[in-house]
Amino acid sequence: MLHQLTHTAPGVRICLGTPVRAVQPDPAVAGGPSVTLASGEVKCSMPISSSARSVKSMLQKPVTGLNDGPTPTGDAAYRVVVCTDLMLQDPKLRPFVETPEMTA
């Protein structure tokens, strides 16, 4: 959907692998909302980033309004995206797709 938007909406550009140095989310501030890239380039845009979900993300406070930094626990969490088409065909793996659950 985002890729299609770059071709149909004027002024939309997707920048991949572009580290963000600062965020100005307030539209009432001159130049806001905007992001400053690590290169120093300022973009008036909305950052859509997988790092915005990260506990170590500098985008977390501007996006959520919370200053909730990480607390070291010694635990690790990993995320993956798995195509479930083949899992649904296997009777032993099917419950992993159909049954919502979490292990903590």
Image (cartoon, rainbow, N blue to C red):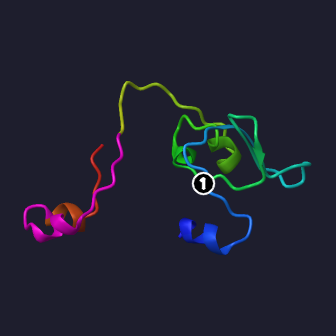
Above or below, comparing residue 73 to residue 92 in the picture = above
Left or right of 41: which side holds 18?
Answer: left
Q: Is residue 46 left or right of residue 81?
A: right
Secondary structure mostly seen in magenta is loop
| Residue at (35% x, 32% y) in the render | 76
- Work out whether residue 95 can be spotted: yes
Taking depth in this image into account, of 79 and 49 the one nearest to the observer is 49
| Residue drawn at (17%, 69%) of the image | 88
| Residue type beneath disc 1 | Ile
Determine if residue 24 is in view: no
Residue at image location 36% in from the left, 46% down from the top = 79
- Pick the residue in front: 20 or 56: 20
Q: Position of residue 23 (x, y in %)?
A: 73, 42
Residue 31, image x, y percentages: 87, 49
In the image, which residues are magenta?
Answer: 78-93
**Residue found at the very far front of the displayed protein:** 7
Residue 11 in the image, given as x and y percentages of width and height: 74, 64
Toward the bottom, the furthest residue is 8
Q: Is residue 28 magenta?
A: no
Residue named by callout 1? 48
